[in-house]
Image (spheres, helix red, strand yellow):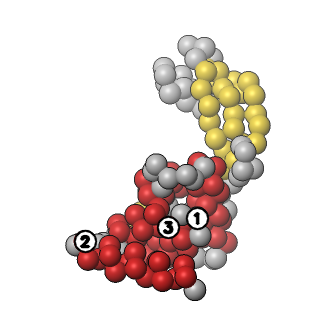
Amino acid sequence: MRCPFCGHEDSQVKDSRPTDDGAAIRRRRQCEGCAARFTTFERIQLRDLYVLKSEDKREPFDREKLLRSVSIAARKRPIDALRLEKLVSSIQRQLETQGENEIPSKRIGELVMEGLKGMDSVAYIRFASVYKDFREARDFEEFAGSVTEAGKN
């Protein structure tokens, strides 16, 4: 593992343990060149996934990018970071086990919407505003109204 501080090629693992959600291994490492310590995370990857964007662009699935977008939607909401991690891990696992290597970005958005809907209505609406490309305040009103109506049923 290359040291992020000096770029030295070798590091020694000082401690390994599973993360809180059990989806990864957290490793504490020490660089053999500069003795700096840093942490790495090791996750299981069942297959290489690619996201099909709207303009027929194809890019590798980026778990951290998905976590960032979910975290932005949930910013300043009473949602534990571990719950967001579990949501993203669950979505990634669903995508990896469905058998397809290329996933339309729309499908990923739908999975996030499903997860946030049961978690927090404000985060759900925030994510939807970007995912559904709201253009005017009326778009927010209509969508928020549908969320409120669904909550009454």
Name the secondary structure under disc 2. helix
Tell me: residue 77, above or below residue 58.
above
Question: Where is residue 133, by image quadrant?
Answer: bottom left
Name the secondary structure under disc 3. helix
Amino acid type at circle 2 is Ala
Query: As rendered, which of 8 and 65 lies closer to the eye?
Result: 65
Q: Position of residue 54 (x, y in %)?
A: 33, 75
Residue lying at the far bottom in this picture: please name it: 153
Q: Position of residue 20 (x, y in %)?
A: 72, 45
Amino acid type at circle 3 is Ser
Q: Which mark is residue 137?
A: 2
* Sequence-first tag of 1 and 2: 1
Q: Position of residue 66 (x, y in %)?
A: 48, 58
Is residue 71 visible from the viewing direction of this image? Answer: no
Mark 1 — residue? 119
* Sequence-first tag of 3 and 2: 3
Q: Position of residue 86 (x, y in %)?
A: 65, 57
